[in-house]
Amino acid sequence: MTLEVSRRGLVIGAGGLLVAGCDKINASPNVRKLLALGEGATYSAQRAIVDRTALAPEFTLAQMSPTFRTNGNTNPGWTEYAGHVASKFADWQLIVDGLVARPLKLSLAQLRAAPYRTQITRHDCVEGWSAIGQWTGAPLYLLLKQAGILPSARFVVFHCADDSGGRPYYESVDLIDAFHPQSILAWGMNGQPLSVGHGAPLRLRVERQLGYKQAKYVMRVEAVASLAGIYGGKGGYWEDVAGYQWYAGI
C-alpha cells in the first residue's frame, strides 16, 4: 500500500461535554419528531460558522484519565470474531469498498505499518460521562484516497462486527468529517493494542462528535451516495433504534 505522507505520530485532542438524563423525554414520538426537525438546522448552522478543518483542543499525557471505561457491547461474541481474537487478528482484514475506484483489503499488520496518527482526546458519552485517552491509528482520509473515493460518494459507513438484538451495528459520517485530520481508525489505545472491550481490532475516532459515533469493531468501510437504503436509513444503529441525532457535533 502506497501512502503519501511520512510515518509519524501527532498529539491532538477533543473537547465538549453533553450531560445525559433525557432518555424518557426522548422516548416520546412527538419529541423525536421535534428533534429531527431541528437537526438539519443545527447541522447547517454549525457547518456555516465552524471551521471545517479546525482541530479540537489537545491534551497532554499528564491529563489522561486513570481509567477509561468500556461502554456498549464489550465483545461481539460470535464464532468468527472469537477466532480472530484467538489468533490476535492475524488473518483479519479491513474491507474498504463501495463508491471507490480501487477496493482495498488490508490486514491489521498492514494498517499498523502504514502512516499513523496519535492523538490524546476526550471521549464525551451521551450517558453523561467523559474520559481522556490516547488513540493511535490510520488517518481515515488516507485510506479513502488510497481506495480512490469517487465523486458520487457523499457518506462513509462503518460496518461493525457486533450487533444488538439481532440488528447489525453501524455508524456513518459525511465526507467533511471523514477527511478531517483527527478522524482515524484506531488500532492502539494508551500505548497498547486496542483491547476487545474497547473495540479491537479497529475503532473509529471522529473527535468532533459525541461518543456514540465512535464505532467499535469496525470490519468494513463503505463509501455511499445516500444513507437511505442502509438498515434503518438514519445513518447509525442508535439513530435507527433510539432516535439519536445523526450529526452529534461538539
Image (cartoon, rainbow, N blue to C red):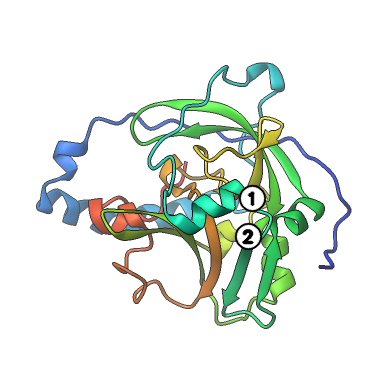
Q: At label 1, which amino acid type do we have? A: Ser
Residue 48, visible in the rendered structure: no
Q: Position of residue 102 (x, y in %)?
A: 69, 80
Disc 2 residue crowd, few under 14, some 14–19, many 20+, Cα 10 Å: many
Q: CA distance from mark 1 to mark 2?
A: 9 Å
Do residues under tags 1 and 2 come within 8 Å of each other at their CB atoms? Answer: yes
Name the residue that disc number 2 marks: 92
**Residue at point 15% right, 48% down?**
31
**Relative to 158, residue 89 above or below:** above
SS assignment at label 1 = loop
Name the residue that disc number 1 marks: 87
Residue 93, visible in the rendered structure: yes
State which mark lies toward you, 1 or 2: 1
Camera-side residue: 174 or 188?
188
N-terminal of the two: label 1 or label 2?
1
Camera-side residue: 170 or 109?
109
Instruction: Find residue 105 and report its image quarter.
Output: bottom right
**Residue at point 83% right, 64% down?**
3
**Residue at point 81% right, 68% down?**
1
